[in-house]
Amino acid sequence: MTKMFRLLSPFALLVFSFLIWIVLFKAYFLGQSGFSSDAISYYEHIHFFIKSFSFGEIPFWDPYWSGGVPNEFFLRRICPYNPLLFPVLLFFKLGMPFYLAYLFFLSFYVFLGAAGMYFLTRRLTGDISSAFLAAVLLLFSAFSTRIFDSYMLFVSVPIIWFFYFLVSFFLKPGRFHILGVTFCLMLLMTTYIPFYFLIAFFSFLVIFFLVYFSAIIVVWQRLTFFFCSHKLFVSACVLAVFLVTLPGALFFLEAGKGKIEVSGRHYNTAEAHGLAVQNQAEDSWAVPEEFYFSAYYSDLRRIVLAIVYVPCFAFILFVLGAGIRASRLMIFLALWAGVILLFTSPFASPFYAFLRTHIFLFKYFRNLHFFLWFILIPIFVLFVAEQFRLFCEAVGQKNRLLLLFWVVIGHTVFFVLLSRQPDVLPTTLVTVVLSLLFFLAYICWESLRSPRVISLCLLSLVVLQPLEVFYYLMRNQDNSSFRSSYDSFSNKISYHSTGVLGEAKQDWFPGDAIPARQSELPVSGFYYATNHYSLMRSFVGAAAVSRFERNKFRAFDRTTRLKNSGWDWASIERAMAGNENMVWIEGASAGLPLFFSGQSPKNFDGPSKEFRIIHFGSNFVTLETNFSSPCFLVWTDAWYPSWQARLNKKPLPVFCVNGAYKGVFVPAGESRITFFYVTPWRYAFECILLGGFYLVFVLLLASGLRKGFFRE
């Protein structure tokens, strides 16, 4: 009986709730549904990273995207240093399909977010039942469904845990909590754009200072004493956070020099920096638009992904809370949410325009509606959980008859308003009735106020409506599965292009015959590409590019130096489309003497006496050549200034060819050529960062075990 009672503990019930969540979305685990929207892109980039890592390589160059791009942008989106990715690699190496391993990883992240909300709410309110309520509300809201069409949990989950560790550190500074703050900061500063988090954090500090001004001196004294007592430890934590920001800072500087372009985000802005984005408008993914769009799905039978949804029990609590006194925590949460709403509603106030004009970081991110998912939904969940705590507290302090009257009136009004709606779900009305019975019983019978009994009742009230809503959500989903464009990537030798990715490229395997359905016109912009490749594609048609990129390596006998007047795009396109033995070279003032041997270049379809690929990966390629005469070897991968080459262990200049590709002069006779992207020092630094993440994570787990955190 005692063991059964322990199974009803709030955290055990949270695990049980997660199992219910898994069952609701079982179609994804059974392969009956696939990812959609941005989730596909993230799946592919993590797939590419895990595969490369399984070959013993961190991929700093992606040869599959937009002709080849620096991979730093995509690595920052997925945070490759995250130790929680290791099980994905392990299960993948053990033979589990990557899709399933990745889906289990995402699902665990969902549970981790709910667990973080449980511990954060418990720390803020001191009430176990309220903490459980906040966790299950978050778990069964649309917050958890975004793993199937977005990537927001990579940011929102570390944010939740960061604030748990930060609040805990404010209340009682300790090594465990500062390790947690450090680890979450390391994740957040290397995940997507850290500006979302920084804005949330700074706004938190400002509101905290205003609402908890009387506690500032006490908190400051605690922190000062801890920092002075643990100078070396704190310095190591600060150094760790600083080091992980360096790759992102270097990438930001490179983008500022015009080496890369994010044309799909950079249009309609006067900023010269390559990562600057267009001005956010009210009708362009601001928070009010998210609500406005969700209003079209007031009939929850039509619900799809990305629609704002929180279980109706949260709104019952919100209504009941109107009759209960407000706590300082509620005031803090309301002000924090209000500030965020103010600058995420561009047409509602001039606040956003002012921030964008005077604070640089507002020029480098868009999609203000992300704050709804990162911050506002968790704040709302915390708010109603605090309202529930205050209601339970009021039961022992106020006239019970008055509370009974308020509960009956509140539920009756709510029920009447809902029943008059044409599209209300049956489970919504049942939830209101059961909620009324629960609160009446809670007020009248003290025996029902055990945290375990309350948690079980709360779980039933929260889950009832989502059972029906998520059923319709899955029914409305596109059930077609998808094939990753990176499935063909391996460390085996390939002499041909294995496909092309990028928003402006054609998703087909190019050959001599160009499908009529594909556009042969030049492309005006890419979501993400090198500036050279993007420029070339804006002048050269898709058919010519496809034919030229069919082989990874091609040897040419005739070259033309680029003149001061710029690239001759018309001639380049004609030569590429006609498979002519001619290329244009940038900066080649003098090269090896080349001999005219034919009208067509040499295209290598496999190993031969003249040419063969020895090794290749994301960051390097090693070749062996044995040409009878000098030639110019072109690798149909995008040129980028960080690429270097060696010929028989000696430096070999890498030239920009046809406005976008890499090429080198190769002498006659036996030679070994190696192209490489990152220097050994940079690669070693990245490995140190990777090891640093795992070290901090292990120290955090060990400290948590000693503290007894996992037994809370």
Image: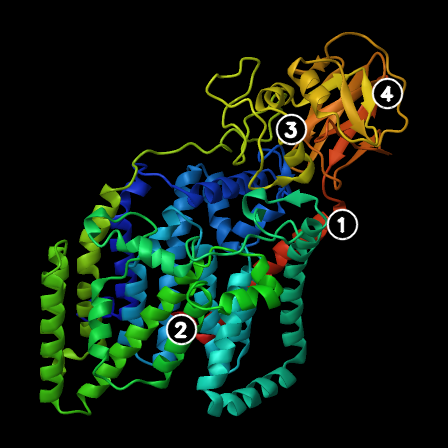
Above or below 443: residue 424: above
Residue 275 horizontal/vertical position (percent): 61, 51
Residue 510 horizontal/vertical position (percent): 55, 20
Q: Amino acid at mark 2?
A: Gly
Quarter in which the N terminus is drawn:
bottom left
Q: Amino acid at mark 3?
A: Phe
- Residue beneath label 3, please? 539
Q: Nearer the viewer, mark 2 or mark 1?
A: 2
Q: Return the disc, 2 or 3, that comes first in the chain's sequence.
A: 2
Packing grade of label 3 (10 A; few <14, some 14-19, many >=20) is some
Query: Residue 681 bears which disc, if any?
Result: 1
Horizontal side, residue 84 vs residue 104: left or right: right
Q: CA distance from mark 2 to mark 1?
A: 47 Å
Asked where in the image residue 376 lies, by quadrant, the reply is bottom left
Q: CA distance from mark 1 to mark 3?
A: 37 Å
Query: Residue 338 bears which disc, if any?
Result: 2
Residue 8 seen in render? no
Query: Residue 667 bears which disc, if any?
Result: 4
Above or below 62: residue 183: below
Contact between labelled residues 3 and 4, with CB atoms less than 8 Å apart? no
Horizontal side, residue 602 vs residue 325: left or right: right
Per the image, label 2 sits on a secondary structure element best described as: helix
Packing grade of label 2 (10 A; few <14, some 14-19, many >=20) is few
Q: Amino acid at mark 1?
A: Trp
Query: Residue 500 bears which disc, if any?
Result: none
